[in-house]
Image: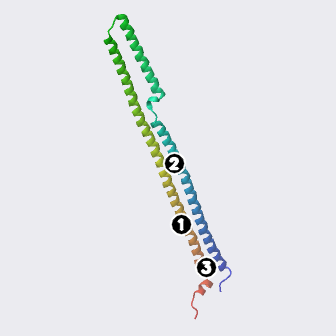
Amino acid sequence: MLTMAIAPAIVAAIIGGVASLASTGIAAKNSKEQANAARDAYNRETEAQRRKNETWYNIRSNQDYTKRADVQAALTKQRELINERYNQSRATNVVAGGSEAALAAEKEAANKAMGETIANIAAAGAANQDKLDQMYLGMDNAASQNMANAGYNQNMQQAQQTAQAGAQASGAAVQMGGALVDALKDKEWSDLFKKKN
């Protein structure tokens, strides 16, 4: 019959193997849940940043460029220069006895200068909009790439953890098999499987 020393060894090997398999499965499940939670938190933060970027872009791109302080200061300075030049021409015209045609020409030159200033401001506004578009696209692409990288990294981590769990399960199965083989080598165990005449 089966000796008392062999049976406990086999039972202990089986229990150890089952416990190892169970702990491996639990660890893999917990690791996967932690990785999913980390990815979800990262994606929420990235999405919040994308909304901030969009708000920033909408405010800047819908802003009237001509209402900016620097643009208003440039327009005011240009008007002052034009008025000062026109007043000087008018004063000179009165003293020197100039014609109305000369004043009209001066006024036309002033209007042309103001038109050029406004055209330059419009061009600067268009360039500013292009710059804002490029900045926003860059920020949005970076956020998208970060989210994609986070998903890829999480998938790679899960694959590594699954492989590790599989290796641990295989190791436990080998240990159980080894214990059974050792037990079967024992003469009393092997006698159990022989035919009796």
Residue 30 image position (x, y, % from top left) = 59, 61
Q: Give left or right: position of 44 versus 80.
A: right
Who comes first in sequence, dot 3 or dot 1?
1
Q: Looking at the picture, does residue 38 appear above or below residue 117?
A: below
Q: Which residue is mark 1?
A: 166
> Of discs 1 and 2, which sits in the foreground?
2
Q: CA distance from mark 3 to mark 1?
A: 26 Å
Q: Which residue is mark 3?
A: 183
Residue 97 image position (x, y, % from top left) = 34, 5
Assign the C terminus to one quadrant of the image: bottom right
- Cβ atoms at labels 3 and 1 below 8 Å apart: no
Q: How is the image coloured?
A: rainbow
> Of discs 3 and 2, which sits in the foreground?
2
Mark 2, Cα crowd under 10 Å, few <14 / some 14-19 / many 20+, is some
- Cβ atoms at labels 1 and 2 below 8 Å apart: no
Q: Element type at marker 1? A: helix
Mark 3, Cα crowd under 10 Å, few <14 / some 14-19 / many 20+, is some
Q: Which residue is mark 2?
A: 47
Which residue type does callout 2 highlight?
Glu
Between 85 and 51, which is closer to the camera in this rendering? 85
Who comes first in sequence, dot 3 or dot 2?
2
Residue furthest to the right: 4
Which residue type does callout 1 highlight?
Gly
Q: Looking at the picture, does residue 93 appear above or below residue 61?
A: above
Q: Element type at marker 2? A: helix
Q: Looking at the picture, does residue 66 appear above or below residue 34?
A: above
Between 166 and 75, which is closer to the camera in this rendering? 75
Q: CA distance from mark 1 to mark 2?
A: 35 Å
Q: Tell me where residue 86 sits by quadrant.
A: top left
Q: Element type at marker 3? A: helix
Who comes first in sequence, dot 1 or dot 2?
2
At horizontal 34% and vertical 13% (from top left) the residue drawn is: 103
